[in-house]
Image (spheres, rainbow, N blue to C red):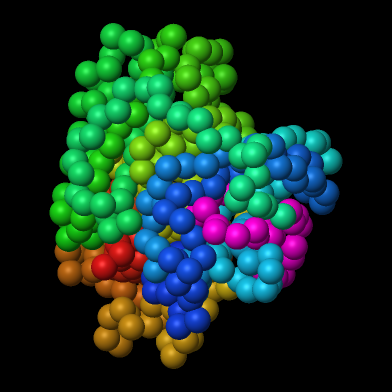
Amino acid sequence: MRTALPLLLLTFITLARSLPAQQPDSASPSFADWFEDRALRLEFVVSGHATEHTIALQEIFEEPCWPENPALLLPTRQLCSTRARIYDAATGRLICQRSLDTLFSEYTTTTPATQNIRRAFEFVVRFPLPKAPVRLVLEERSRSYQYEQVFETDIRPDDLHIRRESVLQDEIHELKIAGPPQNSLDITFLSEGYTAEQAADFKADVQRMADFLMNQPPYNDFKDRISIRGVFRPSPEQGTDEPHQRIYKNTNLGATFNIFDLDRYLLSEQNHNIHRMAAQVPSDTVVVLANSKTYGGGAVCLDYCISTTGHNNSPFVFLHEFAHSFAGLADEYTGNVAYNQMYPEDQEPMEANITRNLNRETLKWRHLLSPDVELPTPELPQPEASQKQLVGAFEGGGYVRKGIFRSEQDCWMGSLRKDEGFCAVCREAIRQTISGHLGQ
Ligand SMILES: [Zn+2]
């Protein structure tokens, strides 16, 4: 593909943290011993600025099934900005751990946050319904990459105030059901900015995006293990907010461009509503489709992603954002973000696809390096087909030009120039993430 870089650079972002673990460790607790095949979803609000914040629990919901792999209660790699740890209250044993990012953690790296302007953001934590009382501890990663406790609360599974009502209210499209949720990758698409008359358009867009994903390596190898569901809720108006253009639309999830004042950065800040809507079906991962022709999207690592559907490049944007929210991959491009030093200079990024380490014995993708490749690897202005596959360490990535390296010259996590899509390192990380979701 040969097109102008500024458009094709995917200049909307996320705290794209790393890969969840692929395999349970040997000490992993047995799901049947500790949990029911249901889920608890906790809705939180976090507010504050760069150096100070408060977390509060708002509501707890019970969901009718646990759709994730029951063997993966304790992923060995926990790599987002926040992790939730569930301890059995009686014994103190760690029985479950989840990772997530919050939009607040991204906000803390922006200029307004460093000027002590307080803002509030929503997030949710979901884990299987415990059989006995548990203690939930939230930990956040510091700038020195240590996890520090920021919140704790006790939860009794028989608490009468846990909300257990049916949440079914929307039109559900089961486009493709691969098998039982615990043994499948369940991708849920939510409608945003489609009016009641556009229900068929939404269904067609879900099909188009899902087909694009399932024909793209490495997802194509897992086609028969992926379930696709759409949840349709009409919006009063079509489209999405574009504040820089003075465009405001009344839509069911309130998605808006210009998050953190960036042109192409689209998100919904109604995190609680997103997950309430998704909870109507078994969901491992959530995608919001915004009915707009404007180029853009966004993602929050291991939480959800959003893309518009009406731009020629929308399918590529969707796959790029999905790689953040599903597989925890980092952006491989440089510049044009609202962050002030997203990656601390003295820390190795946790994501699978960027590094500060040029030692070929310890480089995280050393097993994929091309034979005798030079490190760092010089960029070629017009690489031939075989050179495009070269795996080395190209300088530039993670929003900076210097000091952070990516594995191939081009990859969809950096630009859309690579015809084949993702680089080998990203493909491997996505493949491992999919495998982790598939209970065998
Ligand atoms: Zn890549």
Q: Which residue is the extreme one toward the bottom?
A: 361
Is residue 29 in view from this perspective? yes
Q: Name the side, left or right, on which 369 lies relative to 49.
A: left
> Which image quadrant is residue 137 in?
bottom right
Q: Which residue is pictured at 47% across the width and 86% down the height?
A: 362
Q: Is residue 338 above or below residue 409?
A: above
Q: Is residue 3 above or below residue 439?
A: above
Q: Is residue 149 above or below residue 77?
A: above
Residue 313 on the magenta segment: no
145 and 272: which one is in front?
272
Q: Is residue 51 above or below residue 211?
A: below
> Which image quadrant is residue 376 in?
bottom left
Q: Name the side, left or right, on which 188 lies relative to 180.
A: right
Q: Which residue is pictured at 66% across the width and 37% down the height?
A: 161
The quadrant of the image that shows the C terminus is bottom left
In the rendered image, residue 113, in percent from the top left (x then y), is placed at 76, 42
Is residue 401 in view from this perspective? no
56 and 322: which one is in front?
56
389 and 266: which one is in front?
266
In the rendered image, residue 204, in percent from the top left (x then y), is placed at 20, 26
Looking at the rendered structure, the number of numbered marks drawn on it comes to: 0
Q: Which residue is pictured at 65% across the width and 44% down the height?
A: 159
In the rendered image, residue 222, in percent from the top left (x then y), is placed at 20, 58
> Which image quadrant is residue 411 in?
bottom left
Q: Name the side, left or right, on which 115 lies relative to 97.
A: right
In the rendered image, residue 4, in percent from the top left (x then y), is placed at 33, 40
Q: Which residue is pictured at 36% across the width and 75% down the height?
A: 392
Q: Main secondary structure of the magenta part?
A: strand
Q: Name the side, left or right, on which 44 lies relative to 1.
A: right
Tell me which segment is drawn in magenta: 124-153
